[in-house]
Protein backbone atom coordinates (compact mmCIF):
# COMPACT_ATOMS: atom_id res chain seq x y z
CA UNK A 1 0.00 0.00 0.00
CA UNK A 2 1.22 3.51 -0.84
CA UNK A 3 2.05 5.62 2.23
CA UNK A 4 0.55 9.09 2.65
CA UNK A 5 3.35 11.64 3.03
CA UNK A 6 1.70 15.03 2.44
CA UNK A 7 -1.61 16.67 1.59
CA UNK A 8 -1.53 19.53 -0.94
CA UNK A 9 -4.67 21.62 -1.39
CA UNK A 10 -4.43 23.20 -4.83
CA UNK A 11 -6.36 26.31 -5.93
CA UNK A 12 -7.19 26.36 -9.65
CA UNK A 13 -7.34 29.95 -11.03
CA UNK A 14 -10.84 29.85 -12.49
CA UNK A 15 -13.85 31.87 -11.31
CA UNK A 16 -16.17 31.21 -14.24
CA UNK A 17 -18.75 28.46 -13.92
CA UNK A 18 -21.47 26.64 -15.83
CA UNK A 19 -23.90 27.33 -12.95
CA UNK A 20 -25.05 30.36 -10.93
CA UNK A 21 -25.79 28.90 -7.50
CA UNK A 22 -27.04 31.70 -5.26
CA UNK A 23 -25.06 30.47 -2.24
CA UNK A 24 -21.70 30.30 -4.03
CA UNK A 25 -19.10 32.83 -2.87
CA UNK A 26 -18.17 33.50 -6.50
CA UNK A 27 -21.76 34.58 -7.14
CA UNK A 28 -21.74 36.53 -3.87
CA UNK A 29 -18.75 38.57 -5.05
CA UNK A 30 -20.04 38.75 -8.67
CA UNK A 31 -16.91 37.14 -10.10
CA UNK A 32 -18.67 34.47 -12.20
CA UNK A 33 -17.99 36.20 -15.53
CA UNK A 34 -14.26 35.79 -15.07
CA UNK A 35 -13.96 32.51 -16.98
CA UNK A 36 -10.41 32.92 -18.30
CA UNK A 37 -7.77 31.03 -16.35
CA UNK A 38 -4.11 32.03 -16.51
CA UNK A 39 -1.38 29.52 -15.69
CA UNK A 40 2.22 30.62 -15.23
CA UNK A 41 3.55 27.09 -15.69
CA UNK A 42 2.74 24.32 -18.15
CA UNK A 43 1.59 20.83 -17.07
CA UNK A 44 5.07 19.46 -17.84
CA UNK A 45 6.68 22.07 -15.59
CA UNK A 46 4.26 21.19 -12.80
CA UNK A 47 5.08 17.52 -13.34
CA UNK A 48 8.82 18.18 -12.86
CA UNK A 49 8.14 20.19 -9.70
CA UNK A 50 5.80 17.60 -8.14
CA UNK A 51 7.86 14.43 -8.18
CA UNK A 52 7.58 12.01 -5.27
CA UNK A 53 11.28 12.46 -4.56
CA UNK A 54 10.96 16.23 -4.19
CA UNK A 55 7.81 16.08 -2.06
CA UNK A 56 9.20 13.33 0.15
CA UNK A 57 6.78 10.62 -0.94
CA UNK A 58 3.30 9.99 -2.25
CA UNK A 59 0.92 12.91 -1.78
CA UNK A 60 -2.82 13.46 -1.71
CA UNK A 61 -3.51 16.47 -3.95
CA UNK A 62 -6.89 18.24 -4.04
CA UNK A 63 -7.72 20.41 -7.08
CA UNK A 64 -10.50 22.97 -6.66
CA UNK A 65 -11.36 26.10 -8.61
CA UNK A 66 -13.16 29.17 -7.37
CA UNK A 67 -15.66 28.37 -10.12
CA UNK A 68 -15.90 25.08 -12.06
CA UNK A 69 -12.53 23.34 -11.74
CA UNK A 70 -12.68 21.56 -15.11
CA UNK A 71 -13.71 24.62 -17.15
CA UNK A 72 -10.15 25.23 -18.46
CA UNK A 73 -9.57 22.38 -20.93
CA UNK A 74 -5.90 22.22 -19.92
CA UNK A 75 -6.95 20.99 -16.46
CA UNK A 76 -7.11 17.43 -17.77
CA UNK A 77 -3.41 17.64 -18.57
CA UNK A 78 -2.56 18.93 -15.08
CA UNK A 79 -4.56 16.12 -13.47
CA UNK A 80 -3.00 13.48 -15.69
CA UNK A 81 0.64 14.49 -15.11
CA UNK A 82 0.12 14.48 -11.34
CA UNK A 83 -1.38 11.00 -11.57
CA UNK A 84 1.55 9.90 -13.75
CA UNK A 85 3.86 11.07 -10.95
CA UNK A 86 2.20 8.49 -8.69
CA UNK A 87 0.14 10.83 -6.51
CA UNK A 88 -3.51 10.45 -5.48
CA UNK A 89 -5.68 13.20 -6.94
CA UNK A 90 -9.03 14.62 -5.80
CA UNK A 91 -11.02 16.98 -8.03
CA UNK A 92 -13.98 19.14 -7.00
CA UNK A 93 -16.47 19.51 -9.88
CA UNK A 94 -20.13 20.04 -10.68
CA UNK A 95 -19.94 17.27 -13.33
CA UNK A 96 -21.66 19.32 -16.03
CA UNK A 97 -18.87 19.16 -18.65
CA UNK A 98 -19.56 15.74 -20.17
CA UNK A 99 -16.71 15.88 -22.69
CA UNK A 100 -14.16 16.11 -19.85
CA UNK A 101 -15.41 12.89 -18.27
CA UNK A 102 -15.59 11.09 -21.59
CA UNK A 103 -11.90 11.92 -22.11
CA UNK A 104 -10.94 10.87 -18.58
CA UNK A 105 -12.78 7.57 -19.00
CA UNK A 106 -10.22 6.60 -21.66
CA UNK A 107 -7.25 6.90 -19.28
CA UNK A 108 -5.41 3.77 -18.07
CA UNK A 109 -6.83 1.92 -15.07
CA UNK A 110 -3.65 2.47 -13.05
CA UNK A 111 -4.32 6.22 -13.19
CA UNK A 112 -8.07 6.04 -12.60
CA UNK A 113 -7.72 3.99 -9.41
CA UNK A 114 -5.82 6.93 -7.86
CA UNK A 115 -8.45 9.48 -8.92
CA UNK A 116 -11.33 10.72 -6.77
CA UNK A 117 -14.09 13.15 -7.73
CA UNK A 118 -16.00 15.28 -5.22
CA UNK A 119 -19.19 15.81 -7.18
CA UNK A 120 -21.01 18.96 -6.07
CA UNK A 121 -24.73 18.20 -6.19
CA UNK A 122 -26.46 21.54 -6.85
CA UNK A 123 -29.97 20.10 -6.96
CA UNK A 124 -32.04 23.25 -7.50
CA UNK A 125 -29.76 24.56 -10.28
CA UNK A 126 -29.68 21.16 -12.00
CA UNK A 127 -33.45 20.83 -11.76
CA UNK A 128 -34.08 24.32 -13.13
CA UNK A 129 -31.61 23.86 -16.02
CA UNK A 130 -32.59 20.26 -16.79
CA UNK A 131 -29.13 18.94 -15.87
CA UNK A 132 -29.94 16.22 -13.32
CA UNK A 133 -29.66 13.39 -15.83
CA UNK A 134 -26.39 14.77 -17.19
CA UNK A 135 -24.92 15.11 -13.70
CA UNK A 136 -25.63 11.54 -12.64
CA UNK A 137 -24.69 10.13 -16.03
CA UNK A 138 -21.19 11.56 -15.59
CA UNK A 139 -21.01 10.40 -11.97
CA UNK A 140 -21.89 6.84 -13.03
CA UNK A 141 -19.46 6.94 -15.95
CA UNK A 142 -16.62 7.62 -13.52
CA UNK A 143 -17.90 5.05 -11.02
CA UNK A 144 -18.11 2.38 -13.71
CA UNK A 145 -14.50 3.08 -14.75
CA UNK A 146 -13.28 2.40 -11.20
CA UNK A 147 -12.91 6.02 -10.09
CA UNK A 148 -13.69 6.87 -6.45
CA UNK A 149 -16.27 9.56 -5.82
CA UNK A 150 -18.50 11.31 -3.36
CA UNK A 151 -21.68 13.32 -3.91
CA UNK A 152 -22.01 16.40 -1.72
CA UNK A 153 -24.78 18.94 -1.11
CA UNK A 154 -24.20 22.50 0.05
CA UNK A 155 -27.05 23.13 2.53
CA UNK A 156 -28.96 26.35 1.91
CA UNK A 157 -32.27 27.65 3.17
CA UNK A 158 -33.85 27.61 -0.29
CA UNK A 159 -33.25 23.87 -0.66
CA UNK A 160 -35.17 22.94 2.48
CA UNK A 161 -38.61 22.41 0.84
CA UNK A 162 -37.01 20.15 -1.79
CA UNK A 163 -34.51 18.25 0.35
CA UNK A 164 -36.38 14.92 0.39
CA UNK A 165 -36.64 14.74 -3.40
CA UNK A 166 -32.99 15.82 -3.65
CA UNK A 167 -31.94 12.90 -1.43
CA UNK A 168 -34.27 10.38 -3.06
CA UNK A 169 -32.95 11.21 -6.54
CA UNK A 170 -29.37 10.57 -5.40
CA UNK A 171 -30.28 7.27 -3.71
CA UNK A 172 -32.06 6.13 -6.88
CA UNK A 173 -29.08 6.98 -9.10
CA UNK A 174 -26.01 6.04 -7.03
CA UNK A 175 -27.36 3.94 -4.17
CA UNK A 176 -26.85 6.19 -1.14
CA UNK A 177 -27.65 9.58 0.36
CA UNK A 178 -25.39 12.46 -0.61
CA UNK A 179 -23.11 13.98 1.98
CA UNK A 180 -23.77 17.43 3.37
CA UNK A 181 -21.23 20.17 4.04
CA UNK A 182 -21.58 23.60 5.71
CA UNK A 183 -21.74 26.81 3.69
CA UNK A 184 -19.91 29.86 5.02
CA UNK A 185 -21.12 33.43 4.61
CA UNK A 186 -18.43 35.14 2.52
CA UNK A 187 -20.10 38.55 2.95
CA UNK A 188 -18.51 38.62 6.43
CA UNK A 189 -14.90 37.52 5.73
CA UNK A 190 -13.65 38.53 9.17
CA UNK A 191 -15.90 35.96 10.86
CA UNK A 192 -16.97 33.51 8.10
CA UNK A 193 -20.18 32.45 9.88
CA UNK A 194 -22.60 29.77 8.68
CA UNK A 195 -24.70 30.90 5.70
CA UNK A 196 -28.29 30.68 6.95
CA UNK A 197 -31.16 32.66 8.44
CA UNK A 198 -31.92 29.79 10.82
CA UNK A 199 -30.74 29.59 14.40
CA UNK A 200 -27.80 27.26 14.93
CA UNK A 201 -30.04 24.72 16.63
CA UNK A 202 -32.58 24.77 13.79
CA UNK A 203 -29.84 24.53 11.18
CA UNK A 204 -28.15 21.56 12.82
CA UNK A 205 -31.33 19.65 13.60
CA UNK A 206 -32.68 19.93 10.07
CA UNK A 207 -29.58 19.08 8.00
CA UNK A 208 -28.21 16.49 10.40
CA UNK A 209 -31.46 14.52 10.49
CA UNK A 210 -31.94 14.61 6.73
CA UNK A 211 -28.49 13.54 5.54
CA UNK A 212 -26.95 11.56 8.44
CA UNK A 213 -23.60 12.61 6.98
CA UNK A 214 -20.32 12.05 8.89
CA UNK A 215 -18.88 14.94 6.86
CA UNK A 216 -21.53 17.34 8.15
CA UNK A 217 -21.21 16.07 11.72
CA UNK A 218 -17.44 16.59 11.78
CA UNK A 219 -17.60 20.01 10.12
CA UNK A 220 -20.27 21.03 12.63
CA UNK A 221 -18.05 19.94 15.51
CA UNK A 222 -15.09 22.07 14.36
CA UNK A 223 -16.84 25.02 12.64
CA UNK A 224 -16.28 28.36 14.41
CA UNK A 225 -14.01 26.65 16.97
CA UNK A 226 -10.57 28.34 17.16
CA UNK A 227 -7.68 25.87 16.96
CA UNK A 228 -5.00 26.54 19.55
CA UNK A 229 -3.22 23.17 19.34
CA UNK A 230 0.14 22.82 17.56
CA UNK A 231 -0.54 22.38 13.83
CA UNK A 232 1.89 20.88 11.28
CA UNK A 233 0.28 22.60 8.28
CA UNK A 234 3.01 24.01 6.05
CA UNK A 235 5.13 20.93 6.71
CA UNK A 236 2.83 17.92 6.48
CA UNK A 237 0.48 19.79 4.16
CA UNK A 238 0.41 22.89 2.01
CA UNK A 239 -1.75 25.23 -0.05
CA UNK A 240 -0.65 25.55 -3.69
CA UNK A 241 -1.69 28.19 -6.22
CA UNK A 242 -1.70 26.43 -9.59
CA UNK A 243 -1.88 29.74 -11.44
CA UNK A 244 1.35 31.14 -9.97
CA UNK A 245 3.36 28.20 -8.62
CA UNK A 246 3.25 29.60 -5.08
CA UNK A 247 3.17 27.22 -2.11
CA UNK A 248 1.92 28.55 1.23
CA UNK A 249 1.30 26.91 4.59
CA UNK A 250 -2.51 26.71 4.44
CA UNK A 251 -5.51 28.94 3.66
CA UNK A 252 -3.98 31.55 5.95
CA UNK A 253 -0.21 31.82 5.82
CA UNK A 254 2.72 34.12 6.52
CA UNK A 255 5.08 32.18 4.21
CA UNK A 256 4.71 31.70 0.46
CA UNK A 257 7.12 31.14 -2.41
CA UNK A 258 7.36 29.77 -5.94
CA UNK A 259 8.28 26.06 -5.87
CA UNK A 260 8.03 25.52 -9.63
CA UNK A 261 10.57 28.02 -10.98
CA UNK A 262 13.46 25.79 -9.94
CA UNK A 263 12.09 22.21 -9.77
CA UNK A 264 15.45 20.78 -8.62
CA UNK A 265 15.69 23.01 -5.55
CA UNK A 266 14.57 21.39 -2.25
CA UNK A 267 11.21 22.67 -1.00
CA UNK A 268 11.35 24.59 2.29
CA UNK A 269 8.39 23.22 4.22
CA UNK A 270 7.63 25.67 7.05
CA UNK A 271 5.39 24.54 9.92
CA UNK A 272 2.68 27.02 10.89
CA UNK A 273 2.53 26.01 14.59
CA UNK A 274 -0.31 27.99 16.17
CA UNK A 275 -3.00 28.99 13.66
CA UNK A 276 -4.04 32.65 13.38
CA UNK A 277 -7.32 31.97 11.55
CA UNK A 278 -10.61 32.37 13.45
CA UNK A 279 -11.46 28.75 12.77
CA UNK A 280 -10.30 25.94 10.49
CA UNK A 281 -13.20 26.13 8.02
CA UNK A 282 -11.54 23.53 5.76
CA UNK A 283 -10.65 21.33 8.71
CA UNK A 284 -12.66 18.43 7.31
CA UNK A 285 -9.50 17.86 5.24
CA UNK A 286 -6.60 19.38 7.22
CA UNK A 287 -7.72 18.02 10.58
CA UNK A 288 -9.17 14.70 9.44
CA UNK A 289 -5.91 13.90 7.68
CA UNK A 290 -4.08 14.72 10.89
CA UNK A 291 -2.32 18.11 10.76
CA UNK A 292 -2.99 18.29 14.52
CA UNK A 293 -1.86 14.80 15.56
CA UNK A 294 -3.03 15.13 19.17
CA UNK A 295 -6.61 15.71 17.99
CA UNK A 296 -8.76 12.61 17.63
CA UNK A 297 -10.65 12.76 14.34
CA UNK A 298 -12.35 10.39 11.90
CA UNK A 299 -10.27 9.36 8.90
CA UNK A 300 -10.85 11.25 5.68
CA UNK A 301 -12.22 8.06 4.14
CA UNK A 302 -14.87 7.85 6.86
CA UNK A 303 -16.02 11.39 6.05
CA UNK A 304 -16.28 10.80 2.29
CA UNK A 305 -17.41 7.22 1.76
CA UNK A 306 -20.92 5.80 1.51
CA UNK A 307 -21.99 2.15 1.49
CA UNK A 308 -24.71 1.62 -1.10
CA UNK A 309 -27.86 -0.47 -0.88
CA UNK A 310 -26.18 -3.21 -2.96
CA UNK A 311 -23.12 -3.32 -0.66
CA UNK A 312 -20.80 -1.43 -3.02
CA UNK A 313 -18.92 1.66 -1.84
CA UNK A 314 -18.27 5.09 -3.32
CA UNK A 315 -14.57 4.76 -2.49
CA UNK A 316 -12.62 2.10 -4.36
CA UNK A 317 -10.32 -0.10 -2.21
CA UNK A 318 -6.99 1.47 -3.19
CA UNK A 319 -8.11 5.06 -2.72
CA UNK A 320 -10.02 4.21 0.45
CA UNK A 321 -6.91 2.63 1.99
CA UNK A 322 -4.77 5.64 1.09
CA UNK A 323 -7.05 8.25 2.66
CA UNK A 324 -7.64 6.09 5.72
CA UNK A 325 -4.09 6.96 6.80
CA UNK A 326 -2.97 9.86 8.99
CA UNK A 327 -0.15 12.27 8.14
CA UNK A 328 1.54 11.53 11.47
CA UNK A 329 2.25 7.98 10.29
CA UNK A 330 4.97 9.11 7.85
CA UNK A 331 6.14 12.39 9.38
CA UNK A 332 8.27 13.55 12.29
CA UNK A 333 6.65 15.16 15.34
CA UNK A 334 8.63 17.91 17.08
CA UNK A 335 9.83 17.98 20.67
CA UNK A 336 8.76 20.76 23.05
CA UNK A 337 11.76 22.99 22.28
CA UNK A 338 11.25 22.84 18.53
CA UNK A 339 7.53 23.52 18.95
CA UNK A 340 8.36 26.62 20.99
CA UNK A 341 10.75 27.86 18.30
CA UNK A 342 8.14 27.34 15.58
CA UNK A 343 5.43 29.08 17.63
CA UNK A 344 7.70 32.05 18.37
CA UNK A 345 8.61 32.42 14.70
CA UNK A 346 4.96 32.17 13.65
CA UNK A 347 3.89 34.89 16.06
CA UNK A 348 6.74 37.10 14.86
CA UNK A 349 5.63 36.67 11.24
CA UNK A 350 2.05 37.54 12.23
CA UNK A 351 3.15 40.65 14.12
CA UNK A 352 5.29 41.77 11.20
CA UNK A 353 2.38 41.40 8.78
CA UNK A 354 0.06 43.39 11.08
CA UNK A 355 2.62 46.17 11.49
CA UNK A 356 3.08 46.28 7.71
CA UNK A 357 -0.67 46.71 7.18
CA UNK A 358 -0.81 49.52 9.76
CA UNK A 359 2.14 51.31 8.13
CA UNK A 360 0.57 51.07 4.68
CA UNK A 361 -2.70 52.44 6.04
CA UNK A 362 -0.94 55.40 7.68
CA UNK A 363 1.67 56.23 5.04
CA UNK A 364 -0.03 54.84 1.93
Image (cartoon, rainbow, N blue to C red):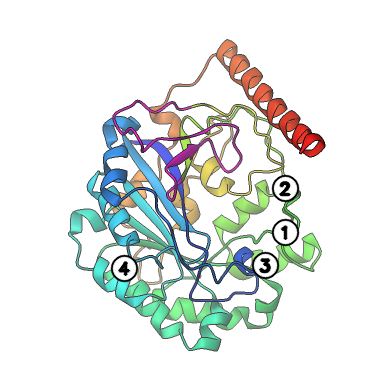
Question: Which label number is shown at residue 28?
Answer: 3
Give coordinates of residue 274: x percent, y percent. Answer: 64, 28
What secondary structure is marked by label 2?
Answer: loop
Left or right of residue 63: residue 283: right
What secondary structure is marked by label 3?
Answer: helix
Residue named by callout 1? 194
What secondary structure is marked by label 1?
Answer: loop
Q: Are marks 2 and 1 in contact (CB under 8 Å)?
A: yes
Left or right of residue 294: residue 171: left
Residue 204 found in image quarter: bottom right
Left or right of residue 20: residue 150: left
Q: Is residue 56 above or below residue 61?
A: above
Residue named by callout 4? 143
Q: Which residues are magenta?
A: 241-269
Count of marks overlaid on the render:
4
- C-alpha distance separating marks 2 and 4: 35 Å
Amino acid sequence: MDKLKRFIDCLVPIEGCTLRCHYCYITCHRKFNNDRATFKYTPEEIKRAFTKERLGGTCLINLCGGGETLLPEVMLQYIKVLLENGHYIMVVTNATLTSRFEEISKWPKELLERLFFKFSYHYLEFKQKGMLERFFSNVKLMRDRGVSFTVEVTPNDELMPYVDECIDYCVKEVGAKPHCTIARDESNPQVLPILTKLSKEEYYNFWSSKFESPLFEFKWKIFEVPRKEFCYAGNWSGFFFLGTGQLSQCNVSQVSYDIVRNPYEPIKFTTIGICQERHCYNGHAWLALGDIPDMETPTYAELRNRICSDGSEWLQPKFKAFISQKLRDENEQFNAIKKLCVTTRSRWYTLRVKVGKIRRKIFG
